[in-house]
Image: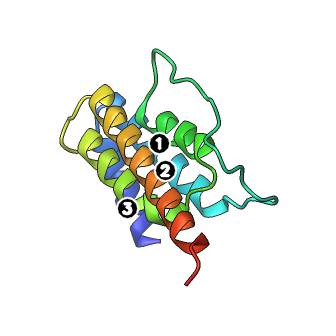
Amino acid sequence: MRDSKRLVSLFRSLSESRQQALLDYAEFLAGKEGAETASAPPAEPLPIPRPEQENVVKAIQRLMQTYPMLERNQIFHEASAQMTRHLVHGVAAVEAIDELERIFARQYQQHLDALKKDAQPS
């Protein structure tokens, strides 16, 4: 209960744009908590185009949908770091999203490399 009061106090001290960013981030975290896939993910990334105007949270959601075969826990730390760079350090959304694109592409390549390694006879 004390944490929720502290969170509300911090929230109220933020500018309107920072409040919205914090809400977006909370939605992202809540989505991560409830994310479960019922069927096997596709082997190839899905062709979901990057919109012209996109916030960092929406970009993370889009990239998670684009790369459903990736382990979310492996990406979460790096994605959270980009969110922090954007929210706390004022890095432009476009720059954070560009870095997120690179992170997901790199994780996908590592995923492919691991599959190839597992498929090789011992």
Residues at marks 1 and 3, CA–CA distance in whole angstroms:
19 Å
Provide the residue designation for mark 2: 26
Q: Are marks 2 and 1 in contact (CB under 8 Å)?
A: yes
First-in-chain label (2 vs 3)? 2
Provide the residue designation for mark 3: 77
Q: Residue at x 37, y 61 (%)?
A: 77
Crowding around mark 1 (Cα neighbors within 10 Å: few <14, some 14 to 19, many 20+) is some
Provide the residue designation for mark 1: 23
**Secondary structure beneath label 2:** helix
Which residue of the protein is positioned furthest toward the left in this rendering? 89
* Of 56 and 7, the residue lying toward us: 56
* Of 8 and 110, the residue lying toward us: 110
Q: Is residue 38 left or right of residue 105?
A: right
Q: Which x, y percent locates residue 55?
A: 43, 29
Q: How many marks?
A: 3
Which residue of the protein is positioned furthest toward the right in this rendering? 39
Please state which amino acid type lies under the numbered disc 3: His
Please state which amino acid type lies under the numbered disc 1: Leu
Indicate whether 112 appears above or below 115.
above
Q: Residue at x 55, y 84 (%)?
A: 122
